[in-house]
């Protein structure tokens, strides 16, 4: 029996002389020893350590306070509470990042020491993961602990040392959207165990000891008192106290000082240039620092949550950049004020932990403001797309976000991101691998870290707006798990981590579930659509477009259920996956398909498509598919039988259209392919026919026929002139149950080919087998009936519903404002018929056509027939910011411009007109007629 002598361990080198530490299985058992004045986090660390050693081994270790005479000890504490711990360790930790810890194992002692409070708790959690193999996979629920604790009767630890510090200083998982007084215990506990920092309730109410008791041991000291944000001005200058006596502290609008609602309760717009107002804020911050100490008080400068009501007094306006006042750029004014206030705080507390929001209307790069290098910038990346990686050049939204972020990075060396991932329905999103790549980018860019919002499933959610909110956290457990680990060490192998945790989580069903999640990730990573606040989610409904993908997922799930039969816990986990798949992948896809118009699409791909007839390129995951084939020559026009199902996938890039045809064939031996030469009689073989009808003045259209040996016939029509060469590249394969044809059509050689164009296309399948099933085509439309071809939108259109195929429940064409105009016709034959003195109007709202300082040249193309004249006019607007207007701007309407007037005939003709949208204007296009016009295929392209 002796008191532990810390001096015995001299250096930090390799401790080969020491033997293993027997954690359990030898007597006397070690005792967990914590300092007499242990921090709350150390007490929690001791409890957690003891509990998990007991779960793993069945042995319960006792805990004692210093001084202890136990011969074998597990010592937990911090640099401050373990002054006798080896000086070298304390020195290294003092210099290390926040949350760093040191683990030292010798034959008589296990030492876990943290830099400061909570670091030793992270140390214990890491110890349990690293040495005992414990994994906190998914947050616990009432009937599932979500964890993995390997059972081992005798735990022996190898002597040695381990130092660890997080790569990122900011690793936050902040509770949002729920009541603060109901603690999401399972979620928060899980977050800390996996290395995250948790949110600080802005002020833990003293009257609620349950909150203090739960949060205090888990909150790092530097997060125990944080303030600011939206209440920066209102907390320091409360309206109740100041408005009557000092109205000049408040916003000046329309010639008077007013209380203007700032978007949150008790929060108003202030005259932030007023030095007295700034002084009150500075006093408030210094008061907080004096109360909690400079290490424990963090303060974040922020402002109201509204875009209007900014003070218009001369002093405030003098802070704005030169030029007309713009409510959307209050950034310069705000950041100049932050600069002034932070300088005053630093003068008194040089080590103050200050940060500032770059958020909302004050996120733009401020003119001529250089923040103190000590101030941390908290960049809210709202508006980014979670469908694409942040540096993906094919995502316009992320290109803009990255540009803004890069400007902040030039301005400050301490920037972290506030992710808006929960304002997006990130439900059942397998984003793990993309997130891992992004975390490595964050490291390369020198970011300080990232903060995610957490809708912890066991929160008490405020309001009942969206019942699926409680599924966001648990349905993304793998994403959250790997993120927590990667924020400590961005180099961890994410695929190895996923294979480990999914193997543990699904037990016997692991092999099937690894295929299941592997396919989900492939679909997720290769779908081209965007998702993210504020424009919602176009990506999830499109995840199951690729034929067979949903069936494959369901097959893996069924396989998993067979493998896990009898294991109630795993079966319950599989049931959750099945529900998530049904609710968040299958249902949105069905809904999208049900609503989809007759318009076909050729989404733009940035991936390479290799024409080899196997359709395995990643790009095909993001393609648009149709399989609406019917008998074309029979009176019944029956739907193609299941055994012959035929699917066409479509894609485009800047110059080409790509098609992938999969034709099921139960008797491949009977396939007829007599044609062996280009432009031979391919149409009399088993073959796929493809018709392309670009908007062309001479009404010519192209026919391409390919047989299952890849032999091509192509011709220009009318006239079937086979001397024409489309340049198509086609490859085909015959498989045991189908044949596949992949082709690339250099469409730009056939007609102007740009994003926003609407072409017409048609597909047919010729079958030459002995049985009755012979000829099929899309919608049963005859091969050369160009008037009934489907519309094909190249890329995403600049003008919506130019084909008039999409109707609302009243039969009106969506996106159009019409008067005395009706959509006539069925299916792809639909067109808009405008009666005398009627019109059809659409404002051009594609982002590239928004009001901007640059003029934008556009071309309007359409087909029309009828009597009398068809007039094309442009309606013009300018929006000017106005803080007092309802939407924050005033709209000025300019005189309407008559762009062109066309004479109509009974035969449809193609018309075009060019227009330059002037700088600083919006444009809307309007069609009107004096007699009768039938309008179709309206397209707008940007030159
Ligand atoms: Zn003012
Ligand atoms: Zn995107």
Image (cartoon, grey):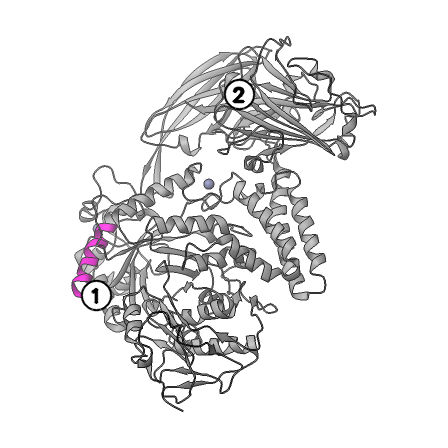
List the single residue furthest toward the front: 17
* Image coords of residue 341 (percent x, y): 20, 58
Q: Would you identify the image quadrant in which residue 634 lies?
A: top right
Task: Kindly identify which residue carries mark 2.
Answer: 746
* Image coords of residue 495 (percent x, y): 52, 52
* Horizontal side of residue 249 vs 224, given as left or right: left
Element marked by disc 1: helix
Residue 649 numbered mark, or none: none
For this rendering, which residue is in front, 864 or 409?
A: 409
> Which residue is found at the position 79% from the left and 30% from the top?
667
Say whether residue 347 is magenta. Answer: yes
* Horizontal side of residue 844 vs 769, given as left or right: left
For this rendering, which residue is in front, 170 or 741?
A: 741
User: Local crowd at mark 2 within 10 Å, few (<14), some, or many (≥20)?
Assistant: many
Main secondary structure of the magenta stretch: helix
* Image coords of residue 312 (percent x, y): 23, 46
* Image coords of residue 741 (percent x, y): 65, 27
For this rendering, which residue is in front, 11 or 765?
A: 11
Q: Would you identify the image quadrant in which residue 588 lies?
A: top right
Callout 1–callout 2 Cβ contact below 8 Å = no
Element marked by disc 2: loop
User: Local crowd at mark 1 within 10 Å, few (<14), some, or many (≥20)?
Assistant: some
Above/below status of 763 relative to 259 = above
Task: Kindly identify which residue carries mark 1.
Answer: 283
Q: CA distance from mark 1 to mark 2?
A: 68 Å
Sooner in the amino-acid sequence: mark 1 or mark 2: 1
List the single residue furthest toward the bottom: 1
> Which residue is found at the position 44% from the left and 44% from the top?
389
* Horizontal side of residue 718 vs 606, given as left or right: right
In magenta, the rendered stretch is 335-351
């Amino acid at each position: 029996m002796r008191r532990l002598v810390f001096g015995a361990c001299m250096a930090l080198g390799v401790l080969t002389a020491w033997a293993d530490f027997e954690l359990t299985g030898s007597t006397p058992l070690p005792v967990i020893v914590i300092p007499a004045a242990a921090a709350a986090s150390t007490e929690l660390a001791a409890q957690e350590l003891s509990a998990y050693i007991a779960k793993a081994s069945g042995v319960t270790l006792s805990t004692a306070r210093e001084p202890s005479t136990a011969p074998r000890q597990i010592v937990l504490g911090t640099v401050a509470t373990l002054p006798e711990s080896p000086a070298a360790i304390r020195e290294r930790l003092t210099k290390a990042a926040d949350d760093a810890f040191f683990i030292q194992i010798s034959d008589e002692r296990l030492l876990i020491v943290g830099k400061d409070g909570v670091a030793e708790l992270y140390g214990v959690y890491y110890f349990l993961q690293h040495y005992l193999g414990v994994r906190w996979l998914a947050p616990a629920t009432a009937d599932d602990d979500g964890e993995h604790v390997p059972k081992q009767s005798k735990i022996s630890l190898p002597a040695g040392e381990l130092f660890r510090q997080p790569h990122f200083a900011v690793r936050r998982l902040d509770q949002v959207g729920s009541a603060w007084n109901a603690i999401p215990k399972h979620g928060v506990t899980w977050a800390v165990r996996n290395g995250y920092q948790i949110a600080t309730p802005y002020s833990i109410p003293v009257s609620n000891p349950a909150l203090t008791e739960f949060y205090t041991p888990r909150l790092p000291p530097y997060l125990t008192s944080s303030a600011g944000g939206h209440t920066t001005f209102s907390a320091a200058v409360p309206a109740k106290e100041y408005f009557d006596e000092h109205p000049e502290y408040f916003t000046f609008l329309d010639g008077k000082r007013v209380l203007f609602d700032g978007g949150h309760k008790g929060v108003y717009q202030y005259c932030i240039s007023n030095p007295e107002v700034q002084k009150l804020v500075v006093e408030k911050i210094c008061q907080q620092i004096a109360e909690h100490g400079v290490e424990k008080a963090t303060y974040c400068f922020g402002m109201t949550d509204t875009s209007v009501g900014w003070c218009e007094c001369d002093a405030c306006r003098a802070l704005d950049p030169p030029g007309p006042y713009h409510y959307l750029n209050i950034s310069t004014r705000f950041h100049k004020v932050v600069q002034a206030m932070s300088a005053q705080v630093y003068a008194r507390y040089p080590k103050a932990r200050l940060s500032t929001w770059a958020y909302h209307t004050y996120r733009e790069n401020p003119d001529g403001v250089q923040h103190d290098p000590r101030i941390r910038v908290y960049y809210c990346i709202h508006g980014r797309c979670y469908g694409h990686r942040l540096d993906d050049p094919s995502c316009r939204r992320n290109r803009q976000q990255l540009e803004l972020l890069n400007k902040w990075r030039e301005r400050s060396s301490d920037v972290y991101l506030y992710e808006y991932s929960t304002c997006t329905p990130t439900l059942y999103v397998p984003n793990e691998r993309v997130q891992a790549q992004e975390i490595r980018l964050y490291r390369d860019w020198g970011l300080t870290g990232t903060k995610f919002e957490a809708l912890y499933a066991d929160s008490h959610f405020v309001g009942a707006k969206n019942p699926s909110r409680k599924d966001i956290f648990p349905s993304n457990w793998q994403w959250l798990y790997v993120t927590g680990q990667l924020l400590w060490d961005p180099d961890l192998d994410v695929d190895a981590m996923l294979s480990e945790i999914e193997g543990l989580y699904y037990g016997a069903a692991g092999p099937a579930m690894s295929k299941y999640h592997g396919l989900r990730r492939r679909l997720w990573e290769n779908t081209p659509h965007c998702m993210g606040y504020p424009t919602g989610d176009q990506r999830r409904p499109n995840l199951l477009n690729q034929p067979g993908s949903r069936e494959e997922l369901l097959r893996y799930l069924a396989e998993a259920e067979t493998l896990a039969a009898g294991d109630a816990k795993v079966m319950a986990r599989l049931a959750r996956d099945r529900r998530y798949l049904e609710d968040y992948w299958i249902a949105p896809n069905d809904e999208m398909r049900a609503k989809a118009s007759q318009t076909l699409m050729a989404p733009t791909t940035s991936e390479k498509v290799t024409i080899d007839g196997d359709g395995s390129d990643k790009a095909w995951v993001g393609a648009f598919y149709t399989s609406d084939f019917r008998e074309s020559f029979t009176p019944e026009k029956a739907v193609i039988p299941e055994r012959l199902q035929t699917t066409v996938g479509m894609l485009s890039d800047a110059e080409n259209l790509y098609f992938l045809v999969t034709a099921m064939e139960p008797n491949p031996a009977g396939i007829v392919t007599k044609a062996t030469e280009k432009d031979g009689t391919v149409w009399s073989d088993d073959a796929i026919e493809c018709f392309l009808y670009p908007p062309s003045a001479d009404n010519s259209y192209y026919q391409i026929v390919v047989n299952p040996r890849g032999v091509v016939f192509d011709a220009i029509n009318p006239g079937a002139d086979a001397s024409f060469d489309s340049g198509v590249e086609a490859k085909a394969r015959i498989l045991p149950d189908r044949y596949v044809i992949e082709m690339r059509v250099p469409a730009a050689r056939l007609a102007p080919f740009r994003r926003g164009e609407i072409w017409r296309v048609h597909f047919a399948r010729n079958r030459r087998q002995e049985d009755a099933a012979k000829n099929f085509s899309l919608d049963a439309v005859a091969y050369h009936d160009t008037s009934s071809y489907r519309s094909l939108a190249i890329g995403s259109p600049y003008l919506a519903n130019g084909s008039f195929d999409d109707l609302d429940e009243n039969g009106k064409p969506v996106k159009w404002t019409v008067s005395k105009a009706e959509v006539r016709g069925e299916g792809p034959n639909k067109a808009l018929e405008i009666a005398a003195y009627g019109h059809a109007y659409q404002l051009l709202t594609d982002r590239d056509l928004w009001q901007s300082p640059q003029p934008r040249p556009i071309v309007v193309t359409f087909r029309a027939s009828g009597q009398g004249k068809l007039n094309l006019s442009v309606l013009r607007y300018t929006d000017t910011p106005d803080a007092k207007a309802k939407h924050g701007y005033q709209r000025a309407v300019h005189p309407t411009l008559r762009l062109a007037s066309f004479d109509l005939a009974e035969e449809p003709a193609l018309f075009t007109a060019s227009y330059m949208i002037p700088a600083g204007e919006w444009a809307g296009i309007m069609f009107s007629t004096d007699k009768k016009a039938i309008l179709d295929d309206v397209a707008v392209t940007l030159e």
